[in-house]
Image: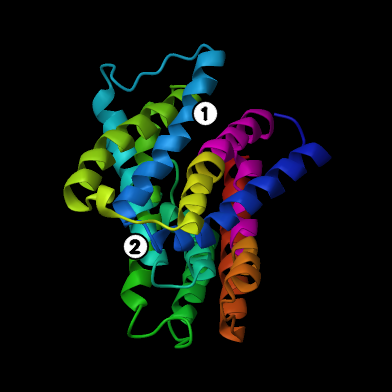
C-alpha cells in the first residue's frame, strides 16, 4: 500500500460526494417508488459494472459455488435488508439526518465485533469513542424540529439499516480469503434474487406511475452511487488500503448536510451541527485508537 497522493485524496473526496449525495436521491426516489422496488432497481444496475469488472479482470464469480449460502446470507444482510430499511427511513426523515445516522456504522460495528470476533475487542479508549459517538445520536432525538413523534420510528429504522450493514460486514469475514470483487458481485447477485420476488409480490411495481425526477434519482443510485462508487472503493482499497478508505466516514455526513440544505431546503438546527461534531469526534477517537492497536 502506498501513501495517498493528490489523486488518491481526490478519489476519496469523490467517493464521499457520491455516497453523501445518495441520501437526497433516495428521498426523491421514494416519492414514486416503494422501498423494495427501489432497492431492487438499485442493486440491479449496480450489478452491471461489477460483472463487467470481474469479466475484464478474469475474476471467477462464486455466487453459486459450494459457499453459496454465505454469499446469499451476506447479500441479504449487507445489501437487501439495509437498502430497504434505509429507503423506508429516509422517506420520512431529512435526507441529511439519514447520512448522519448512517455515519455511526463503524461504532455499531465495533460493538458487534467485540462480541463476535476474537481480535476486535473494545479497549477503554475505543469504548470511550463509541459512547461519545452515540451520545451525539441521542442528542439528535432531543431536537424536536427534525425528530418528533411523527418520524422517530423512521429514524430508528435507519439506524437498524446501518446495524445490518455491520452484521453483513461481520459475515463477510467468513469469505476473507476471497477476492473483494467476487464477494461484492456475488452478494449483489443474491440480493437481486431476494428482492425481485418480494418486489413483485408485495409492491406490484407495474402499477406505479413514477415521476421523471424519481426515476432519474433511482438510476443515479444504481449506476453511480452503488455500481460506480463500489468500483472507486475497490481502487482505493487496492492502492491505499482499508484504513485510508474508512476516512470517507468523516466526509459523508458533511456532504449529506450540504446537499440536504441546498438542494432539498431541509432545516438545519444548531443541535444537528453539535450532534454531527460529537459523532465525528467519537469516530475519530475510536479509529485513532483502533489504528494504534493494529500497528
Answer few, some or many: residues within 10 Å of disc 1's Cα (few below 14, many 20 plus, some between 14 and 19): some
| Magenta span of residues | 227-253
For the point 46% across and 51% down, the residue is 215
Image height of 48 relative to 265, above or below: above
Mark 1 secondary-structure assignment: helix
Q: Residue furthest right?
A: 6
x%, y% of residue 7? 79, 38
Residue 187's quadrant in the figure? Answer: top left
Provide the residue designation for mark 1.
49
Answer few, some or many: residues within 10 Å of disc 2's Cα (few below 14, many 20 plus, some between 14 and 19): many
Horizontal arrangement in the rendering, residue 94 relative to residue 113 (left or right): right
Q: Is residue 149 magenta?
A: no
Horizontal arrangement in the rendering, residue 165 relative to residue 235 (left or right): left
Residue 63's quadrant in the figure? Answer: top left
- Residue 122 visible, this angle: no
Provide the residue designation for mark 2.
88
Q: Given contact means CB atoms under 8 Å apart, are the residues at marks 2 and 1 in contact?
A: no
Mark 2 secondary-structure assignment: helix
Amino acid at each position: 500500500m502506498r501513501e495517498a497522493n493528490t489523486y488518491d485524496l481526490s478519489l476519496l473526496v469523490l467517493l464521499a460526494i457520491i455516497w453523501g449525495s445518495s441520501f437526497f436521491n433516495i428521498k426523491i426516489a421514494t416519492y414514486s417508488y416503494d422501498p423494495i422496488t427501489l432497492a431492487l432497481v438499485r442493486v440491479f444496475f449496480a450489478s452491471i459494472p461489477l460483472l463487467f469488472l470481474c469479466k475484464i479482470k478474469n475474476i471467477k464469480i462464486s455466487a453459486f459455488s459450494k459457499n453459496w449460502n454465505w454469499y446469499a446470507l451476506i447479500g441479504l444482510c449487507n445489501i437487501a435488508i439495509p437498502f430497504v430499511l434505509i429507503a423506508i427511513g429516509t422517506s420520512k426523515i431529512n435526507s441529511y439526518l439519514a447520512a448522519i445516522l448512517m455515519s455511526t456504522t463503524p461504532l455499531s460495528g465495533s460493538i458487534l465485533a467485540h462480541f463476535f470476533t476474537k481480535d476486535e475487542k473494545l479497549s477503554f479508549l475505543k469504548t470511550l469513542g463509541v459512547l461519545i459517538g452515540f451520545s451525539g445520536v441521542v442528542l439528535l432525538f432531543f431536537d424536536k424540529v427534525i425528530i418528533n413523534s411523527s418520524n422517530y420510528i423512521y429514524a430508528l429504522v435507519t439506524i437498524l439499516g446501518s446495524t445490518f450493514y455491520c452484521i453483513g460486514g461481520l459475515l463477510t469475514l467468513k469469505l476473507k480469503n476471497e477476492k473483494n470483487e467476487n464477494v461484492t458481485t456475488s452478494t449483489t447477485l443474491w440480493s437481486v434474487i431476494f428482492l425481485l420476488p418480494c418486489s413483485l409480490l408485495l409492491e406490484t411495481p407495474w402499477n406505479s406511475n413514477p415521476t421523471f425526477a424519481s426515476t432519474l434519482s433511482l438510476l443515479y443510485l444504481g449506476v453511480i452511487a452503488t455500481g460506480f462508487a463500489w468500483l472507486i472503493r475497490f481502487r482505493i482499497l487496492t492502492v491505499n488500503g482499508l484504513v485510508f478508505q474508512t476516512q470517507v466516514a468523516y466526509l459523508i455526513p458533511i456532504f449529506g448536510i450540504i446537499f440536504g440544505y441546498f438542494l432539498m431546503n431541509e432545516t438545519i438546527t444548531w443541535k444537528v451541527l453539535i450532534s454531527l461534531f460529537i459523532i465525528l469526534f467519537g469516530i475519530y477517537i475510536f479509529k485513532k485508537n483502533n489504528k494504534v492497536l493494529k500497528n
